[in-house]
Amino acid sequence: MQAATGAAASKGTLQDGARHNPSADVQWTDRFGDGTPDFLRLDSPSDQESFRRWFTLIAEFQALRAPAVLPSEINDCAALLRYSYRSALHAHDAAWLKEADIVPPSALGAIEKYQYPLTPLGAALFRVRPGPLTAEDSHNGGFAEFADAQTLKEFNTHYISRDIHAARPGDILFYRQLQQDSPFHSMIFVGRSQWIGEGGGDFVVYHTGPEGKTRGGMRRLALADLRQYPSPRWRPVAGNSNFLGVYRWNILRGAN
């Protein structure tokens, strides 16, 4: 098995000008010192819950749909994270639902604070280097549209626990497999499925990344099965040194 490799602007909701011009009426504060601007953080419980539900619904859908119609950009575990993250923050209007080919099985709330890509950073949502946040990061390469699994772990999420019971829907399980060329891998903790009524079990989804000469593909696995996986290096248990732990997106930092 190969595992799948914000306070807002100065007042109220970001205005249209601020969404397109990083220097217009934007406060470059970072109250947690993790490099993520506060204007990207989802402060309200309703926005946090909406993000979690959309993120997991979109990620799980990729594992349930036919491989032939999987978006071509999802070619490894980090790509699945990026795609699901951006899509969760998007305006989920009729045009987006048609393009994504998704019909949610139940109504989901909208994220009110902002909608991708209308942010002071535009589409460049991912922190890609260390160091304190500054306004210059809006144009000096501090943020980008692309980030690999290691970069997502180090600069866009924060550590929660090595106890899988601490995971909430939308959290990420990170691994480091030194015996592979690309050692950092990730899985998305879905929790209970929003798509399929299968009782009370929790699930994870991930993209395997390339497998030999093939592109690999999406996988969906019950957490109970992952904890007993034949190869111990993929088990999310404290005794597995390859399992780095449960991580949470920085935009949810401070959430309960």
Image (cartoon, helix red, strand yellow):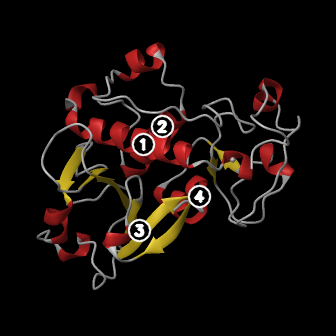
Percent across and percent down for residue 183 are 39, 67
Q: CA distance from mark 1 to mark 4?
A: 14 Å
Q: CA distance from mark 4 to mark 3?
A: 13 Å
Q: Is residue 110 visible?
A: yes
Q: CA distance from mark 3 to mark 2?
A: 20 Å
Q: Label 4 is placed on what type of residue?
A: Asn
Q: Is residue 207 visible?
A: no
Mark 3 lies on residue: 246
User: What crowding class fits label 2: few (fewer than 14 Cα within 10 Å), some (14-19), or many (20 or more)?
Assistant: many
**Please, is residue 244 above or below residue 15 in the view?**
below
Mark 2 lies on residue: 88
Mark 4 lies on residue: 250
Determine which of the numbered discs, if any, sits on residue 55 in the image. 1
Left or right placement of residue 3 versus residue 227 in this view: right
Q: Tell me whether the residue at label 2 lies in contact with that at label 4, contact meaning CB atoms closer than 8 angstroms.
A: no
Q: Tell me whether the residue at label 4 lies in contact with that at label 3, contact meaning CB atoms closer than 8 angstroms.
A: no
- Label 1 residue SS: helix
Q: CA distance from mark 2 to mark 4?
A: 15 Å
Q: CA distance from mark 1 to mark 2?
A: 5 Å
Q: Label 2 is placed on what type of residue?
A: Ala
Seen as rendered, the residue at the extreme bottom is 239
Q: Looking at the image, tell me whether mark 1 or mark 4 is earlier in sequence order.
A: 1
Q: CA distance from mark 1 to mark 3?
A: 16 Å
Residue drawn where x is 88% and y is 34% of the image: 24
